[in-house]
Image: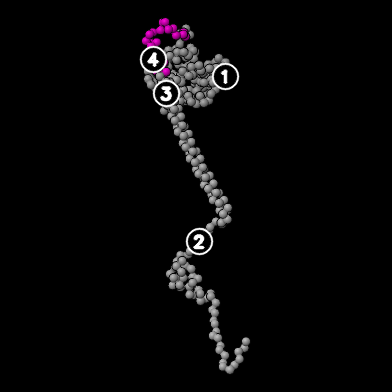
Amino acid sequence: MEFQEGMEPNLEAKGDTHTIGSLLKLYLRSLPDSVIPSSLYEDFVAIILTYELNQKEGLNELRYLINKIPCSAYNTLRRLCEFLYKVQTFSDLNRMDLNNLAIVFSPTILKNNSGNLDLEMRDMQKLKRVTEIMILNHEALFPEDKEEEDQEDLDLENIDPDELKNLYTVKMIKYQVQAREILTKDKEIEKLRAQLAQSQNTIMEQEQTILEQRNKIDQLEENVQQLQSQETCSGSSPTTTSPLPPPRSSKTVLQGGSKNGDLSNSPLVRRRTQPVTRTKPPVKPRPGTICDP
């Protein structure tokens, strides 16, 4: 509230370190546009590709982009990077090393106003890396404060030829990196298409095999129906297969059974099961007697 009223409060006497740090972040978040204008969002994200290939060329292109920032935002960013560099030198005490500082301040100094959360998550690591580079190289990137009259458009007629050549080289490196990424993605897409085509061929072969098996099953069913109809027309009942005889044992052979295990002809079985028929001899009449008719 004191800052909003135009006062200059004594921060050492009022408030602790955490309150002052929160106040700084609140100020950066409350700006109508981020310190680095959102119109330069894509350019600052893409600078990482050039920096990873050639740090010198990457710093030159980053310095060129920083010079596009409006005067007041440029001076604010310069002071902020200078201050954060000093803070990270005391990381043993405050536990705020370069990585932690970049994580905290990168979303506030460079924002994407499209509201696309997926895009912010995708570029999170790149924004953090850009913030680290600006903090570490603040003296080379921000040699001095910018005055209002210094803010002029690039004059191609009066620009130094070496500087123009340098900018051209940086742009060419950037376009080459992007071309390599596009070629890599195209190769991945072609590989996926080949795998998809192979999978489709495999599926078609399996479907053809299943169709052939179904045709064979249908043919067998037709043959069975024809045989059944022929048997019905001839009036013959289907033959039944007799069960296999029981295995032959030594006891069966000793008792006189047949070789196939049948005991019906065995002497013991005949003696017990068949009725015994006894025939009496005929009686002859004695001489001189009359036989009963």
Image spot of residue 50 (x, y percent): 40, 20
Residue 222 counted in the magenta span: no
Q: Residue at x 50, y 24 (%)?
A: 119
User: Toward the viewer: 142 or 235?
Assistant: 235
| Location of mark 4 (residue) | 169
* Earlier residue among tags 4 and 3: 4
Please state which amino acid type lies under the numbered disc 1.
Met
For the image, the number of numbered tags is 4
Image spot of residue 8 (x, y percent): 53, 16
Q: Are marks 4 and 3 in contact (CB under 8 Å)?
A: no
* Earlier residue among tags 1 and 4: 1
| Location of mark 2 (residue) | 243
Image spot of residue 183 (x, y percent): 42, 23
* Earlier residue among tags 1 and 2: 1
Quadrant the C terminus occupies: bottom right
How dense is the environment of label 4, judged by Cα within 10 Å: few (below 14), some, or many (20 and up)?
A: some
Circle nearer the viewer, 4 or 3: 3
Q: Distance between the residues labelled 1 and 4?
A: 49 Å
Q: Do the residues labelled 1 and 3 touch (CB within 8 Å)?
A: no
| Location of mark 3 (residue) | 183
Q: Can residue 135 be seen in this view?
A: no
| Location of mark 1 (residue) | 1
Q: Can residue 195 be seen in this view?
A: yes
User: Where does the magenta region start and end?
Assistant: 151-175
Please state which amino acid type lies under the numbered disc 4.
Thr
Q: How far apart are marks 1 and 3 (CA)?
A: 55 Å
